[in-house]
Image (cartoon, rainbow, N blue to C red):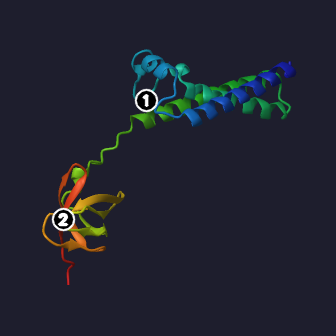
């Protein structure tokens, strides 16, 4: 009996590695079967359970099978060398595979539902202060940089007034048009 189960454990481990590799290389928002078989055959039958939600149909998800196959195969292989009976090894490997498969499915489902609420439009930069990165000479377009909590933002910029703005000059963004910032100089506090 061990020889047959050993092949099953090796096969499931191999299947899990293949599914993990495909998910890594293919990527995407949801690498599940037909977008989880049409959103898991209609709305997942979700009900709140500890904040992660409960889905009655994880079996259509490739993520479930990826975690199940890896865990079932590796658990079966490792427990086979401990000296337990084949029935106990199969039962424990099946339970572990199912638990990890469902946990992985639920975790990814929860992460997909998270929403980023930060304003990511360029218009949020209006009124922000920055500094000149590439000098703005006359009518030419230069570049400015704005340091924000979310990171560094570089924008093409023009200075509509007569004069030049040299590298490092402090500026404020007055307006944004078609991705180009119109800036005005600010004077550092004495």
Which class describes the residues within 10 Å of circle 2: few (<14), some (14-19), or many (20+)?
Answer: many
Q: What is the residue that sits farthest to the top in this orientation?
A: 41
Residue 117, numbered label:
none
Measured as percent of width and height from the top left, residue 139 is found at 19, 63
Residue 37 vs residue 87: left or right? Answer: left
Identify the secondary structure beneath mark 2. Answer: loop
Q: Is residue 74 above or below residue 3?
A: below
CA distance separating discs 1 and 2 = 53 Å
Q: What residue is pinned by disc 2?
A: 159
Measured as percent of width and height from the top left, residue 145 is found at 31, 64
Q: Nearer the viewer, residue 22 or 177?
A: 177
Q: Nearer the viewer, residue 143 or 51?
A: 143
Residue at 30%, 74% in the rendered image:
168
Q: Nearer the viewer, residue 177 or 135?
A: 135
Measured as percent of width and height from the top left, residue 11 is found at 75, 24
Q: Mark 1 or 2, which is nearer the eye?
A: 2
Residue 154 vs residue 76: left or right? Answer: left
Residue at 53%, 23% in the rendered image:
61
Tell me, yes or no, if residue 56 can be seen here: no
Identify the secondary structure beneath mark 1. Answer: loop
Which class describes the residues within 10 Å of circle 1: few (<14), some (14-19), or many (20+)?
Answer: some
Residue at 78%, 21% in the rendered image:
87
Q: What is the residue that sits farthest to the front in this orientation?
A: 139
Measured as percent of width and height from the top left, residue 48 is found at 40, 29
Q: Is residue 41 above or below residue 164?
A: above
Residue 170 vs residue 72: left or right? Answer: left
Residue at 22%, 57% in the rendered image:
181
Q: Is the N terminus in the top left, top right, bottom left or bottom right quadrant?
A: top right
Q: What residue is pinned by disc 1?
A: 53
């Amino acid at each position: 009996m061990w020889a047959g189960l050993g092949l099953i454990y090796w096969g499931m481990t191999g299947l899990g590695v293949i599914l993990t590799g495909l998910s890594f290389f293919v990527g995407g928002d949801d690498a599940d079967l037909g977008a989880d078989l049409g959103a898991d055959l209609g709305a997942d039958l979700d009900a709140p359970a500890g904040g992660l939600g409960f889905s009655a149909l994880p079996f259509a998800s490739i993520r479930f099978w990826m975690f199940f196959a890896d865990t079932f195969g590796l658990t079966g292989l490792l427990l086979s060398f401990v000296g337990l009976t084949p029935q106990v090894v199969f039962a424990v490997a099946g339970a572990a595979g199912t638990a990890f498969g469902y946990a992985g499915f639920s975790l990814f489902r929860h992460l997909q539902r998270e929403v980023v609420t930060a304003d990511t439009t360029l218009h949020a930069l209006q009124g922000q202060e920055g500094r000149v990165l590439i000098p703005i000479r006359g009518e030419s377009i230069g570049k400015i940089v704005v340091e924000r909590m979310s990171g560094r933002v570089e924008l093409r910029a023009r200075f509509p007034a007569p004069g030049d703005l040299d590298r490092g000059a402090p500026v404020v963004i007055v307006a944004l048009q078609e991705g180009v910032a119109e800036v005005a100089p600010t004077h550092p506090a004495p």
